[in-house]
Each structure stands twice: as structure tokens, then as C-alpha cells.
Amino acid sequence: MRFRKFTIISILFALFASAQAQEKGGRIYTEFIDSTFSMIQDQWLYIEKVDIEAYRRKADSLKKHIESTEELMPLFQQMFDEAQDNHSFFWVNNKKYSSHFGQLSEDDIRKPLMDALENGEGIYKAEIIDNIGYLRIPQDNTSDNPKAMQSHAQNFHQQICEIYEQNPEGWIIDLRLNTGGNMYPMISSISAIVGEGDFAYQVDRNGNKTNWSIKGLAVMQGKDTITSLIKTCLPDLSIERLVVLTSQMTGSSGEITALAVSKRPNTYFIGEQTAGFMTSNELIRLPQEVFLLLAHAHEANSDGELVNKITPDLEMIEGDSFSNLLEDTKVQKAISWLKNRD
């Protein structure tokens, strides 16, 4: 009888503990769900493409039966899929949860591009090739710390200054290995080539525009200075001859960097159509150490025209040779255009 009584008490205690855990878990996930849907309703570019209340109800129905926020991620991925949002994603426990729509897998990417990344070619590079200034701008993982952005941009800017001192006949900006990251050090370092004034716009779901611009040594978003060079040794290079190289991997901030020079004079694009991750994403920190990169605006060129992908003036698919640029057929074509305008 004692054994039975002890067993019943143990079961009741276990049920009580389980109920408490569920209640606590429910509160935790309620906070996460509330915060997430609040941000989505306030900012998400594609909210009109889905029934957001239906997704909210589904999330609420799941919260009592899950043990981690990761178990909610398939629901949000389904939502991104339905909206055909290829750029928003969650970052949970060092894992990315994005739409399945419009993503590039390693199998989709041409082998020379993957080989270049694996061989360490995805680095900033500035050099003279046949009296042309060659600037490779790869993915940039600089943090959004102002000093870090300034230091990184200033360092590459100085390398460009050293090329300028050799009197190049023109410039190549190579964005073929640029899959995104922090756009501000990229654009700050080449601000003399981009030129003063507005270089692109963000356009939110209500049609409100915010300009990106170069003002003096600063890269601006609206009225805010995001980063600034400490000093410059370059004159205005905004009308100098320029070729931009793009690939199927050029995406996100790499595409914005291409967009920044797309309307400048004496500019020619060679390569492939870009990846098409051309929305502005807001970094949002959520409960449970979850980060949401949420698409909140379209991107437009300096004329205010919305752009989904960058299409080159001259399409060239094969011929990449990052380890020997003189054998790279796209670099060869760029040099020819810069020198002869053929």
C-alpha cells in the first residue's frame, strides 16, 4: 500500500513538474512568437503575400508542444517560401533557416567559382594588370562596429591609392566572388570611384524612399553617417573608365555595390546576371538568442528604378582564372574595353 501511495505521489509530482515546465516553455515561446510576429508585421516587405494571422495561429498552436525555438523554424521557412522571399532568414544556434525559394546550392555554382573560394581567392586584392587598376571586392564579414568598418575601408582605400599613383588607364572592380556581407566598407573604400551624391535607394512596402549617398568622405543612409574614411589620397574618379565583373554568385551587398556604380558614366558590366538577393535586410535580435535578418525594402538605382538583378552589358559565362588574371578571359575583355572601347 505504501508502495502504491508513493507511486501515485511520484506520478502526480511528475505531472505537476511537467505542467510547470510546459507553462514555463509556453511563456518563453509566447515571448518569442510575440516579438517575431510584431517585427514581421511592422517591417516585412512581403507581408501582403501571405495570411500572416494564419501563420500566427499556427505558431501559437505549436508552442506548447515544442522544446526549442528551432522547432518553429519550418513554419517560418514555409512562410518565406509562400511569399517567395529568398533573402530573409533566421539564425539559430549557428544555423541558417531561410526560404527554399531562389537559393543557390553548391551544385548550382560553377566549379571555377567554388574552386576560387576554396583556394582562398575570396580576399580583397588591388594590383596593376597591363596598366589597369584591378580591384577585387569579395564577401565582407566586417562587423557593424563603426571603428571596424572605418579601419577596414581605410586599409583597402590605401591600397587603391597605391594603384592610382601608377597612373592606370582605367579600373576593374571584380565582384564575382562577392556573396554579400557588410556593404559599407566595400562602398566606402571605392567612394572616389562611386562619386558624390545618391548612388541607390531603399524603397519600403509603402513606397517610402531612403537614399544611400556619398558625402565627402562619408557613406550615408538618409541623414545618418554609417561610416567614413579618415582621409583620402584620391581625386574624384567618378568619370574614369570602369568595368565591373559579376557572376551568378554576386549577391546581396555585392549586388548593391554593383548597383552603386551602375548609372555612372564610362561604366561597362561583363559576366553573368547576379544572384538576385536585392532587398535590404534589417538585423533583429529576438528572444532566445535568435537573430532575424528581415527583408524590409526593395533596392533601386540612382534613378529610382527598382532592380531585382544586375544584368551585364556583355554576358560571359566561362573563362574565370582567379589565380592567373592574365589568363582570365573576362579580365582580358575588360582590359580591351578600357583601352579600346571595342
Image: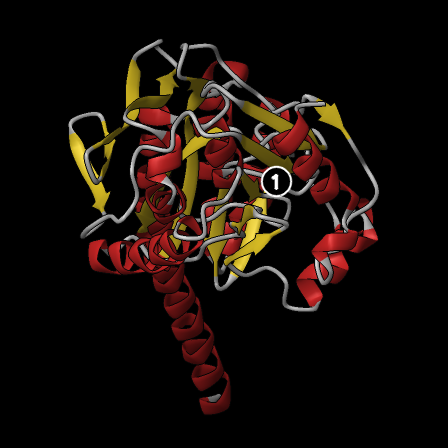
Left or right of residue 177, residue 170 in this image: left
| Number of on-image labels | 1
Is residue 231 toward the left or the right of residue 131 in the image? left
Relative vertical location of residue 138 with respect to residue 54 in this rendering, above or below: below
Instruction: Please name the amino acid that badge 1 sits on.
Output: Thr
Q: Residue at x 31, y 49 (%)?
A: 285
Q: Nearest the camera: 245 or 13? A: 245
Quadrant position of residue 23:
bottom left
| Residue at the disc numbered 1 | 250
Where residue 265 sits: x, y (%)? 47, 19
Query: Residue 82 placed where, x, y %?
Result: 62, 25
Mark 1 Cα-neighbour bin, 10 Å: few <14, some 14–19, many ≥20 = many
Which residue is more in the foreground, 269 or 240? 240
Depth check, front residue: 175 or 166:
166
Q: Is residue 181 above or below residue 206?
A: below
Q: Secondary structure at mark 1?
A: loop
Q: Position of residue 341 (x, y in %)?
A: 66, 23
